[in-house]
Image (spheres, rainbow, N blue to C red):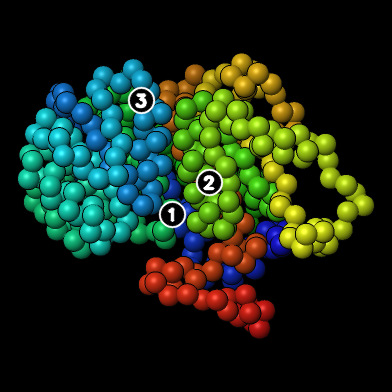
Amino acid sequence: MLDDILLSDPRALAALDTGGVLRAAATAGAQVRSAAQGATDAGLRDLSGSRPRALVFLRRPGASGPAAGLLCALLGPASAMPIVVVDAVPGWIGPLDVVVGHTADADDAELADGIAFAVRRGAEVVLSAPTEGPVASAGAGRVRLVEQRIPVPPGLDLPRALAVGLAVVGALGLLATPLDSAMEPLADQLDAEAERNQPGHEPFMNPAKSLALRLAEHTPLLWGTDPLGAAVAEHAAAALATHAGIVAHADDVGRAATATGLLRALDRASAGADVFRDPFEDDADGGAQAPPVRLVLLATGEDDPGQVTLRVAGRRWPSADVIHPVDEVARGVPHAGLLRAGLLASRFDVAAVYLGLATRTNDPEYRDDARSGGARFSAGATREES
């Protein structure tokens, strides 16, 4: 159960956040700046003017998949070259291709093998990874290595992965409007979002806390009304799973509208719950009732999300929460969609961390044991004893 009082108590939050996850989530802007500088130091500007046969993004566990999804959505089908997202380096890779890899796991053996293979085949390789370990060693001296300068807990490195990918597509001239190599507009938006979401702000002034309260004790349906919004939804679902142990459904609103079971669940949720029902009483079959669904529409484009939903899904959901940050990023601003997508991804990261803390599921000791292959079946009992 969510301890909503906890979200209004910054001291209690700080006491629970022994791993400094909230502080790490606030480094999104700093991650972008350091990655942009790292990309410059790695010589990514030398890619300018080249026309590769294909741009290949390696999708490994962690932030590389969501970053690749955001970049593909940003470039769209009109990209000047094929964009390929794969889990492993394909056998056809060669000297006419550019390969981009990102990881926070310095010991990812499969990625290390893939990097070594791509280098042997003569591909141009851009790698965002820790400077020590098998992954970096696999391409030592033969890849453009963007160092990890701001370590963060697992699941919070999307800003770095995204910034490195943006540096690559920017150098290759794939963006219709050139992006400043320092990426200051994106970093500034992420800094402003971190300021809004700081623990000292009450939920009504803190969009991440407000979002956490809306999602608590529900099954979130995160549906994007545009390609970037759908890509953010995928990341948001991963963030909720990582930091709060919450299972969410993420998709494009047009595809999601064909899932008839979810539509029925939405209609039931919109009708309202029985005020006489005991929430602590199990169902007749002995199983607890599933949490009700809550629809959140994510929008990054210029169009009104309600009109888009009506056009692509054939209907609207008046009870849906619509997150369309046009107040933070005004219409007509250069790269507005990208800025809104980065802002939304950061907001969901922080909201997921708040949910994890307020429900006592964001346990740093469990994180450490999980990474080392151990198990803590007594976590709940330990917290009760304390």
Using a 10 Å C-alpha cutoff, classify the residue at mark 3 as few (fewer than 14 neighbours), some (14 to 19) or many (20 or more). Answer: some
15 left or right, relative to 285: left
Amino acid tagged 2: Ala
Q: Is residue 369 above or below residue 204?
A: below
Instruction: Indicate the quadrant where residue 312 lies.
Output: top right
Amino acid tagged 3: Leu
Work out whether residue 42 or residue 309 is closer to the camera in this orientation and state it: 309
* Residue 353, horizontal then vertical, whole percent: 55, 56
Using a 10 Å C-alpha cutoff, classify the residue at mark 2 as few (fewer than 14 neighbours), some (14 to 19) or many (20 or more). Answer: many
Residue tagged 1: 155
Residue farthest along the bottom direction in this orientation = 385
Q: Is residue 272 above or below residue 218?
A: above
**Is tag 1's residue or tag 2's residue first in the polypeptide sequence?**
1
**Is tag 2's residue or tag 3's residue first in the polypeptide sequence?**
3
Looking at the rendered structure, the secondary structure element under dot 1 is: loop
* Residue 83, horizontal then vertical, whole percent: 28, 29
Residue 270 in sight = yes
Amino acid tagged 1: Gly
Looking at the rendered structure, the secondary structure element under dot 2 is: helix
Residue tagged 3: 75
Q: Is residue 290 above or below residue 267?
A: below
Could you tell me how far apart the alpha carbons at marks 1 and 3 are, in whole angstroms? 24 Å
Could you tell me how far apart the alpha carbons at marks 1 and 2 are, in whole angstroms? 11 Å
Residue tagged 2: 237
Instruction: Indicate the quadrant where residue 373 lies.
Output: bottom left
Instruction: Indicate the quadrant where residue 87 lies.
Output: top left
Residue farthest along the front direction in this orientation = 285
